[in-house]
């Protein structure tokens, strides 16, 4: 099932996207992310359907937190001159950086090196704390969602401290267009994903190339923090980011991103300058 949220004249609404390309709007918006409740309401939906192309997309959920994994593809670590990590590198993106799949991405004031990172997002469906083993971890995954971990490299790497400055500018986390529920993803390590800038394909890879897979990450992260329903783990990006180009290239106002993953849809975002 494909879960999404749309802006309507009556406000934000939960919705589901059917195989025929029509979107069924559900009554109301869920307070907390509850995939089972979403499914029940979808089964009972009687509202008018809208063509997907005609809806105004919001992010498909408002995460409690976004836990990001750094350098989780060997080719991306290598393009940055870094060793593949011995265990997952974690950092956080603030939930208020999340925007919809068609929203503008704002280049922050003082930003010089705004960059892109297509990633597989894992949506948590059940509270997970100190999971016993990797085998149990997948039961805590509700679904998958496309993430662009937009990053300002100048802030991230040349302004001191940890990575937070470069990862948390407003609009730096386009999410969606939809959540694909886990029952429709037989193998999360076999999802092709990529990103184009102004029509030029710069990232084109597969989650098969991840160093630490989804089950490992969910189990691992649960040893350090409690994961709650609606939290998102963004699992890292493959090679082909702007900083890895030769010469490096970064985003400018007017650029257009197309971000995609098989089964997870596409994001289309325009870059704009900060007001
Ligand atoms: Zn990332």
Image: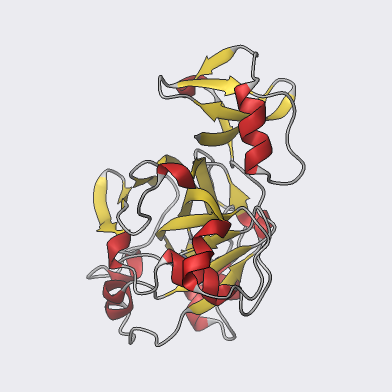
Q: Can residue 100 be seen in this view?
A: yes
How is the structure coloured here?
Answer: secondary structure
Task: Determine the residue positioned at 54% across, 40% down.
Answer: 103
Give how far across and how far down residue 47 sits, in percent. 65, 14
Give how far across and how far down residue 150 sits, in percent. 48, 60
Task: Determine the residue positioned at 33% across, 87% down.
Answer: 83
Which of the two residues, 222 or 24, is positioned nearer the viewer here?
222
Task: Determine the residue positioned at 24% across, 70% down.
Answer: 247
* Relative vertical location of residue 81 with respect to residue 247 in this rendering, above or below: below
Q: How many labels does the image show?
A: 0
Image quarter for residue 262? top left
Lateral position of residue 255 relative to residue 225, left or right? left
Which of the two residues, 158 or 5, is positioned nearer the viewer here?
5
View extreme (right): residue: 31
Lateral position of residue 26 relative to residue 49, left or right? right
Give how far across and how far down residue 243 sits, in percent. 34, 70
* Relative vertical location of residue 270 with respect to residue 207 in this rendering, above or below: above
* Relative vertical location of residue 1 with respect to residue 163 in this rendering, above or below: above
Give how far across and how far down residue 216 sits, in percent. 45, 72
* Relative vertical location of residue 47 with respect to residue 97 in this rendering, above or below: above
Which of the two residues, 158 or 32, is positioned nearer the viewer here?
32
Q: Can residue 107 be seen in this view?
A: no
Task: Determine the residue positioned at 58% across, 82% down.
Answer: 162
């Amino acid at each position: 099932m494909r879960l999404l949220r749309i802006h309507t004249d009556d406000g934000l609404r939960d919705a589901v996207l059917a195989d025929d390309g029509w979107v069924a709007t559900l009554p109301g918006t869920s307070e907390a992310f509850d995939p089972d409740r979403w499914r029940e309401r979808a089964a009972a939906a009687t509202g008018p359907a809208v063509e997907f192309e005609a809806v105004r997309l919001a992010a498909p959920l408002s995460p409690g937190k976004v836990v990001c994994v750094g350098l989780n593809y060997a080719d991306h670590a290598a393009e940055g001159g870094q060793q593949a990590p011995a265990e997952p590198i974690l950092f956080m993106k603030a939930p208020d950086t999340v925007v919809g799949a068609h929203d503008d991405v704002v280049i922050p004031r003082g930003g010089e090196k705004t960059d892109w990172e297509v990633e597989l997002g894992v949506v948590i469906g059940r509270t997970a704390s100190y999971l016993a083993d990797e085998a149990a971890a997948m039961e805590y995954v509700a679904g998958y969602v496309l993430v662009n971990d937009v990053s300002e490299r100048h802030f991230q790497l040349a302004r001191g401290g940890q990575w937070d400055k470069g990862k948390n500018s407003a609009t730096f986390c386009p999410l969606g267009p939809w959540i694909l529920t886990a029952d429709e993803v037989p193998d999360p390590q076999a999802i092709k994903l990529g990103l184009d800038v102004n029509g030029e394909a710069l990232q084109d890879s597969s989650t098969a190339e991840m160093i630490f897979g989804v089950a490992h990450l969910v189990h691992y992260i649960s040893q350090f923090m409690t994961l709650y329903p609606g939290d998102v783990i963004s699992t890292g990006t493959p090679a082909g980011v702007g900083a890895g180009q030769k010469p490096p290239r970064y985003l400018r106002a007017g650029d257009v991103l197309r971000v995609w993953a098989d089964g997870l849809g596409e994001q289309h975002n325009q870059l704009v300058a900060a007001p």
